[in-house]
Image (cartoon, rainbow, N blue to C red):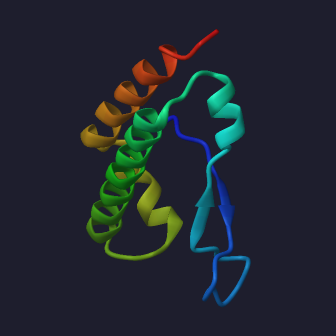
Amino acid sequence: ASITLNKNAVFGDRSALSPGGVRIGTPALTTRGFKESDFEKVAEYLIRALKIAQRCQTEAGSKKLKDFIPIIKKDAELQNLKKEVEQFALSFVY
């Protein structure tokens, strides 16, 4: 969906190899002009991406990446989200 994040371990994770959190580079985004409402929009994009991934994983029928990748790659909802994210990001190019 053209979203890049860092995976980070959070309290309660059993292993740093399978982190339960993400980190968004907020300083880099504020220097590009992000305001509070823009971060809320990013949160909405992340929630949508998560729901799409969960649906695709269910559709794949397993938790194996080899089963998940073909399904997520052809998902129309993900492609629409990607277009929205890219359009949003273009408004911050300086």
Name the one closer to the observer, 52 or 73. Answer: 52
Name the residue at the top extreme: 94
Residue 93 in the image: x percent, y percent?
Answer: 59, 13
Image vertical order of residue 33 relative to residue 69, above or below? above
Residue 7 in the image: x percent, y percent?
Answer: 66, 61
Q: Is residue 75 left or right of residue 11?
A: left
Q: Is residue 50 left or right of residue 39?
A: left
Name the one closer to the observer, 54 or 14. Answer: 14
Name the residue rendered at 45%, 75% in the picture. Answer: 63
Determine the image quadrant of residue 79: top left
Name the residue rendered at 33%, 65% in the picture. Answer: 54
Determine the image quadrant of residue 6: bottom right
Q: Is residue 25 left or right of residue 85?
A: right
Name the residue rendered at 50%, 23% in the picture. Answer: 89
Residue 13 in the image: x percent, y percent?
Answer: 63, 85
Q: Quadrant of the C terminus?
A: top right
Name the one closer to the observer, 36 or 75. Answer: 36
Name the residue rendered at 46%, 55% in the picture. Answer: 69
Q: Is residue 37 left or right of residue 31?
A: left
Image vertical order of residue 50 relative to residue 79, above or below? below
Residue 85 in the image: x percent, y percent?
Answer: 42, 30
Name the residue at the front extreme: 36
Q: Quadrant of the N terminus?
A: top left
Determine the image quadrant of residue 53: bottom left
Give the mark count: 0
